[in-house]
Image (tube, grey):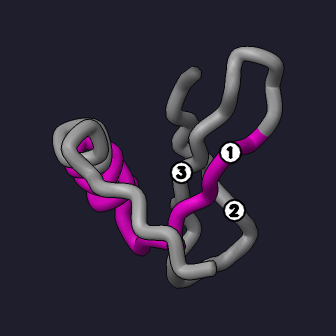
Amino acid sequence: MKFQIVKGKSTTQPFFWRIVAANGQTLAVSENYAAKASAKNAIESVMKNAGAAKVEDLT
């Protein structure tokens, strides 16, 4: 699994990130960011905090 920082088509918020599985399937996509550094900071936050996240079943 890996994170990818991508530059999209938006001129005001062109950067976003996605999580991609080993088989190439996209698992998650972030919101858009104006700065690449903001996208990197968001990735770091997810990496730091996701392991302790709880699963909430809303079905």
Q: Could you say which disc has been placed on residue 45 in the image?
A: none
Quarter of the image for residue 29 reads bottom right
Amino acid beneath label 1: Leu
Q: Is residue 31 above or below residue 19?
A: below
Lower sequence index among marks 1 and 2: 2
Lower sequence index among marks 3 and 2: 2
| Crowdedness near tag 2: few (<14), some (14–19) or many (≥20) residues, C-alpha within 10 Å | few
Q: Is residue 4 magenta?
A: no
Where residue 1 sits: x, y (%)?
57, 21
**Front tag of 1 and 3:** 1
Q: Could you say which disc has been placed on residue 8 in the image?
A: 2
| Crowdedness near tag 1: few (<14), some (14–19) or many (≥20) residues, C-alpha within 10 Å | few
Quarter of the image for residue 24 reads top right
Amino acid beneath label 3: Trp
Q: Nearer the viewer, residue 11 or 32?
A: 32
Where residue 31 sits: x, y (%)?
52, 72
Pointer 3 with pointer 2, Cβ within 8 A: no
Amino acid beneath label 2: Gly
Residue indicated by mark 1? 27
Residue indicated by mark 3? 17
